[in-house]
Image: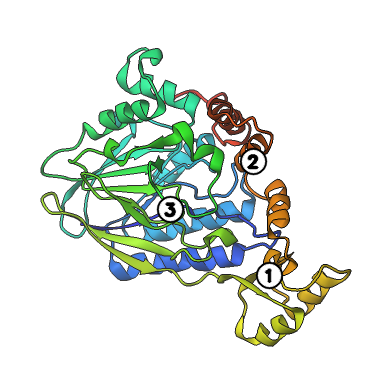
Amino acid sequence: MKFLHTSDWHVGKQLKGRDRLDEQKAVLREIVEVARTHEVDAVLVSGDLYENAVPGASAQQLVVHTLMSLRDLGCEVIALAGNHDHPGSFDAYRPLMGRAGITLLGNIRRPGSGGVVKFKARSDGQDTSVALLPFLSQRYAVRAAHLMTQTPAESSGAYDQMVREILGALCGEFHDDTVNLAMAHLTMTNGAFGGGERMAQSIFEYSVPATVFPAECSYAALGHLHRRQTLPAACPVVYSGAPLAVDFGEQDNPSVVCIVEATASTPAKITDVPITSARRLRTVNGTVAELEAMADDLGDDYLRVLVREPARAGLREAVSDVLPNALEVRIDPEFTGSAERSARHRDRTTGSPQELFERYMEQSGAKDDAVSRLFAQLSDEVTASDAADRTEMPA
């Protein structure tokens, strides 16, 4: 059977205040066309469909329209919640989407209650099982592990052990004569970050080894890390990566979806299909005159500009006049001759909350891994879209 693997759409994400909904619409339209061209049996969307836990109406409309367009192709469509999504909302829409033939999952479920989806591939009638693991926060993982194993939460141990127990229960539904797939929104140990991930939910206890997926799994379709990569394990453990760069830190990442062919008895064959609809992100440097000279070659790329001139009043405006798509303008630290001072200043003003906190601790001479872990957990409770306190665990 053949399926398309994608993740981390982040619909509704802006770039330096610039709305990108038209780009996101073009990218998702391109993904639908790839699914159509390759005549896939299923489409797996491994989380972070939205940028925010409370997406705007236009973002929701785009995602729902895309899922329905994929379903109109006649293929199975399965999507689960990532750390940017609101799991309670996913589950609220689950019955309605189910009527349209689309599987949407926000919270962990037992295998027989929606945690494992089974279907026959339309192309060859191959029996297929898909184990679903939405994003789990630390505190929700305890409840989820208890749900799956019926053992006391305190015996579950660390986060990675709880994930093992949950996957063990879900993948217990796999059989030798079926194509066995797993979907998850996780951080894998030694995985390469794409540049735009929410760091508080990507490090420390949130990291698990790729060996959590059993050898019986034909393919593990992951979301969360935005860089396309395959991790060494007993089965293919694959991040499809984000289909468009969400920030300048991802400007060099290839934007693809994965077309996968799998049987019950042979290794999965993976083909990367480029997604090219989004505007390119690029970092350029030079004097204002040099920037003006290269303007025609930059097209409609979104730009991060490092200006090789001393700071002066009106410099940002001068750059914006010659490069209207300059979304970020800085003085090039190499040009100023004070790269170290500029780096220190930049460290205080850019980066995720976790990065800023760790820089502060290091500069204060009080670096402590235990305190950093505690900060990550507290930051998670504030920023996560986890609705565990507002919804009951499904049966």
Q: Point out which mark residue 305 bears.
A: 1
Task: Tell me: residue 325, above or below residue 190.
Answer: below
Q: Nearer the viewer, mark 3 or mark 1?
A: 1
Mark 2 burial class by Cα count in 10 Å: few <14, some 14-19, many 20+: some
Quarter that holds the C terminus: top left
Name which of mark 3 and mark 1 comes first in the sequence. 3
Residue 295, quarter of picture: bottom right
Q: Point out which mark residue 96 bears.
A: none
Q: Nearer the viewer, residue 146 or 327?
A: 327
Name which of mark 1 and mark 2 comes first in the sequence. 1
Q: Which residue is mark 2?
A: 359
Residue ranking furthest to the front: 337
Q: Nearer the viewer, residue 305 or 303?
A: 305
Q: Position of residue 329 (x, y in %)?
A: 73, 66
Task: Tell me: residue 154, above or below residue 357.
Answer: above
What distance separates the C-alpha of mark 1 from that of mark 2? 25 Å
Q: Nearer the viewer, mark 2 or mark 3?
A: 2
Q: Nearer the viewer, residue 120 or 193?
A: 193
Could you say whether the residue bearing mark 1 is in a helix, strand or loop? strand
Three-letter amino acid code at disc 1?
Answer: Val
Residue 26 is left or right of residue 100, and the answer is right
Task: Tell me: residue 395, above or below residue 364.
Answer: above
Q: Which residue is mark 3?
A: 7
Q: Nearer the viewer, mark 1 or mark 2?
A: 2
Q: Position of residue 46 (x, y in %)?
A: 40, 48
Could you say whether the residue bearing mark 3 is in a helix, strand or loop? loop
Residue 2, quarter of picture: bottom left
Residue 297, quarter of picture: bottom right
Q: Nearer the viewer, residue 387 or 117?
A: 387
Three-letter amino acid code at disc 3?
Answer: Ser
Q: Position of residue 313 (x, y in %)?
A: 89, 69
